[in-house]
Amino acid sequence: MRRAMNIRPAGGARVLLALLPFLLLALVYVFGSAERRAANPNDKLLPPISEMADTAARMATEPDRRSGEIVLVSDTTASLQRLALGLGLATLIGLTLGVAIGILPVATAAGGPLVAVISMIPPMAILPILFIVFGLGELSKVVLIVIGVAPPIVRDIAMTVQAIPVEQLVKAQTLGASTWTTVLRVALPQALPRLIETVRLQIGPAFLFLIAAEAIAADSGLGYRIFLVRRYLAMDVILPYVAWITLLAFLMDFALAKLARGAFPWAYAGERR
């Protein structure tokens, strides 16, 4: 008897199974929108897909009357700049501190408990403090992303390095490797694949912190636009923006997955397909 856990879809069946949930959700939305519009032609909660497509096309192609900029392009550029800077700094901090805490007993004793405590602080709870300390400009938004994302990366990389077999570290030292050489030749190659996977897991939280900061204090950005039009119940703007943010996050995750498998194929040799 063939077990369900051993059935692996391939080719067209795999693509169909991937698309099926999205098609079902689209059908549910279409029927729900049609029902609400039939009951109330002025309903704004579930606008038709055609109406959202027209609004999205207008915001992606027509310049704004006040600023002269294409709204979707300017919002996306502003948000991605903040996200790239915050996520990049968090990744650098996470790799540096994570490897240090993972391989140096002194750093483990001194920094491990501190990072563990900081990682338990809800970043949104200190958002007002960040605005007070760093102001309402770009810096506070970037710092929020760093504070929210860096501690989990540090802890994950530290645990990855600590999981390296002691025999490898002893063998490297026996062959004359210094601490720095051991980090570069033993710890870092094994930590980098995990770093990319950890960053992939932090894309969602990073977008969450970014949108929250933009909603409170910003004059551009995807989160700013969503919270600007909410007072008008402009779901034909909000829903396409949510879909656009989701697509951006998916593309970033997909690119990182391809990077990891291309740069470190040995780390995925035993992966189930």
Image: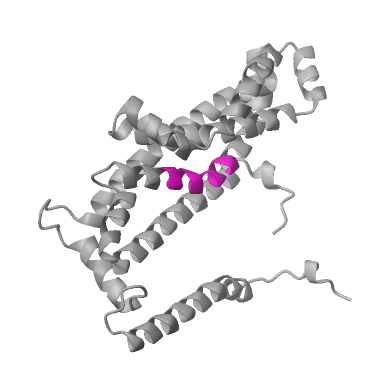
For the C terminus, the quadrant is: bottom right
State which region is magenta. Answer: 197-209
Instruction: Give the left or right position of residue 209, taking residue 13 as reference.
Output: left
Residue 13 lies in the magenta stretch: no
The reply to whether residue 184 is in sight is: no
For the image shown, how many numbered marks are present on the structure? 0
The image quadrant that residue 33 belongs to is bottom left
Q: Residue at x 71, y 47 (%)?
A: 269
The image quadrant that residue 151 belongs to is top right
Q: Viewer-proximal residue, 139 or 250? A: 139
Instruction: Give the left or right position of residue 200, taking residue 178 as reference.
Output: left
Q: Is residue 67 above or below residue 138?
A: below
Q: Viewer-proximal residue, 42 or 66? A: 42
Q: Position of residue 71 (x, y in %)?
A: 22, 55
Q: Viewer-proximal residue, 163 or 225? A: 225
Q: Position of residue 52 (x, y in %)?
A: 30, 72
